[in-house]
Amino acid sequence: MSEIRAHNVWMEYGDQIVLESISVDIASGAFVSVVGPSGCGKSTFLRMILGQERPTRGVITVGGAALQAEPGPDRGVVFQRYSVFPHLTALQNVLIAFEIAESPFTAKLFGAKRKAASEKANALLEAVGLSENAKKYPSALSGGQQQRLAIAQALAREPKVLLLDEPFGALDPGTRAQMHALIKPLWRERGMTVIMVTHDLKEAFGLGTRLLAFDRPRIDPQAPERYGARIIYDLDLSRDGPVPVLGFSRPIEPSTTSQETKRSMPHA
Ligand SMILES: Nc1ncnc2c1ncn2[C@@H]1O[C@H](COP(=O)(O)OP(=O)(O)OP(=O)(O)O)[C@@H](O)[C@H]1O
């Protein structure tokens, strides 16, 4: 079943075409790695799925429904920069996600509801390996621990879709490997659809069941804003080796004007 579907989606900022003609179906439960050169629109693509940005053309549906203007609880997000609340402890950071979900106006729960939320928050901290740090403030946590906390916070509302925007980009290689070992079982156990933007090809191939490479197949040096990025490679990584999936989008041949140049592989 298709969880996310983009049909002929374009994103333009003024005269700048960032993404053009993006059509993709992402199956429920997939782990999709998104790669491509800096500035080609990977984060823009994520923000559109999150509902923070509306495509200027085309349609995106999540779970068969058109996207709401505001990000909903069905989608969680983790960014590269730590996005947790600095004035709350680790436990309070996760707890507040439950409180906002259940009591959006006051973000406060009382009695049995608060107790249940506390138990769930503690269980999530345990799942991401932060039980012993529950009372610490983010400033007393390492970079990797802060990202674990951000992941716990994103998981609190049990999202069907988890969007990761270079979530491990700021971490050292050892911590990054620990985060890989954390995220894969969480994804499997929770049956989420994950879309992860990364510049690290090893990470993209190692974690993903599918890889989407974005790049601008046509470039007009006189007017760089004229063409946007497309999905130039779409690889199924779920089998033994990377093989093209059905609907594989080949790099588009540039038109024959002399100003246009072609780039073949994305540098991630
Ligand atoms: N709100 C905005 N207003 C105008 N231009 C924007 C806006 N957001 C993004 N852009 C432009 O859209 C293009 C794509 O940006 P985006 O952040 O999606 O790229 P990216 O592929 O994620 O880059 P990176 O890998 O460096 O993070 C850039 O040229 C950027 O300047």
Image (tube, grey):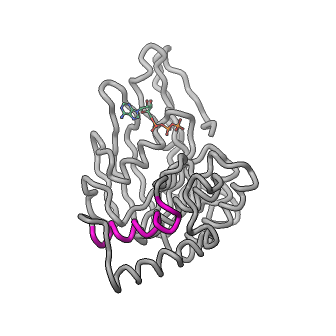
Residue at the spot 50% in from the left edge and 14% down from the top edge = 258
The spot of residue 198 in percent (x, y) is: 59, 47
Residue sitting nearer the eye, 184 or 8: 184
The spot of residue 82 in percent (x, y) is: 53, 50
Q: Is residue 94 magenta?
A: yes
Residue 189 falls left or right of residue 174: left
Q: Is residue 218 above or below residue 82?
A: above
Residue sitting nearer the eye, 134 or 41: 134
Outermost residue toward the right in this view = 174
Residue 61 falls left or right of residue 150: left
Image quadrant assignment for residue 187? bottom right
The spot of residue 245 in percent (x, y) is: 55, 58
Q: Report if residue 66 is visible in the image.
A: yes
The spot of residue 205 in percent (x, y) is: 66, 55
Dominant SS in magenta? helix
Q: Is residue 117 above or below residue 144?
A: below
Residue sitting nearer the eye, 245 or 237: 237
Numbered range of the magenta stretch: 88-103
Q: Is residue 118 above or below residue 42?
A: below
Residue at the spot 62% in from the left edge and 55% down from the top edge = 140
Q: Report if residue 212 is visible in the image.
A: no
Residue at the spot 47% in from the left edge and 59% down from the top edge = 88
